[in-house]
Amino acid sequence: MKNKHECCYCGELTSYELCRDCYYEAKDGFIIKNEDGIWIRNIKKGNEYRFYDENKNYYLKQEILNEFEMRFFNIVRSTLSKKYAIIPQVNLQSIITTDSIKRNDELYRNVDFALFYAKDFTPFLIIELNGQQHYTNEYNKERDKSIKQICDRVQLPILTIDIKDLRKMKNSEIFNIMKKVISYLNPSFFKKLFKKQVDKMDLTWTKEYIKKTR
Ligand SMILES: [Zn+2]
């Protein structure tokens, strides 16, 4: 019997360069030899689509916000106090995390807008402008439900405005709604409520309010 020595990747005793487990991992390309001849984990394996691809052409988008998003953004931006900031296209994983060691793919979702307290950049409101496809497309419905469930868990309220409604609203009406929502969620009030009375964070009343203002 051959002398046993340490597996070059994991250190397990073996008669070969790699132990049995590592041999199969190497066969499948999960561990590879680097240019210095050292066995390393192949971080690109299974992540092929998550890195730069030289075969693609990359372009800057012509239009990042659509007509309605741009209009809404401009109105809110021009009327918000300096205490708050509105950011479009916020990815959930930049404001929410988990205790899981798995990849949080469910957080790789953009919401239309997030409002932050400018002082410490704490998010306090998500705003989604929903077009028709949010109500008819099953995948979009699941996506919206998932976002709602995640935001509920961190007690981040979502204000949803139908583009159908937005289309009919005057700038001053949009301004008034946002003023009302923000005063409802004002920082001290919000902090007092935080983790205590989540039901107060419910924004379903805004739906009625938006209908009334039309
Ligand atoms: Zn090994």
Image: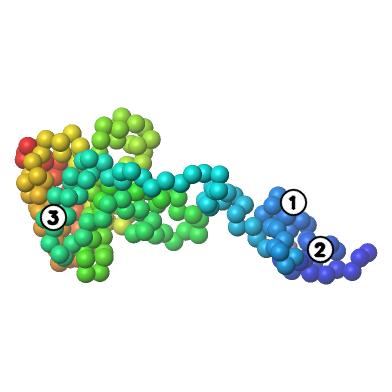
Nearer to us in this view, 56 or 23: 56
Amino acid under disc 3: Ser
**Horizontal side of residue 96 vs 26, given as left or right:** left
Task: Give the x, y percent position of residue 7.
Answer: 77, 66
* Amino acid at the residue labelled 1: Lys
Q: Earlier in the sequence, mark 3 or mark 2?
A: 2
Residue 159 visible to an observer of this rendering: no
Please give the name of the residue rendered at 9% of the width and 49% of the height, measured from the top-left corner: 175
Q: Name the residue under label 3.
A: 78
Q: Residue 27 carries which label?
A: 1
**What is the quadrant of residue 145 in the picture?**
top left
Q: In the image, is the residue at mark 3 within 8 Å of ligand 1 by its beta carbon? A: no
Lower position in the chain sequence, tag 1 or tag 2: 2
Q: Can residue 77 be seen in this view?
A: yes
Residue 207: give x, y in percent of width and height.
Answer: 15, 41
Q: Which of marks 1 and 3 is nearer the N terminus?
A: 1
Residue extending furthest toward the top: 136
* Quadrant where the image shows the C terminus: top left
**On the rendered image, what quadrant is the N terminus found in?**
bottom right
Residue 96 in the image, given as x and y percentages of width and height:
36, 58
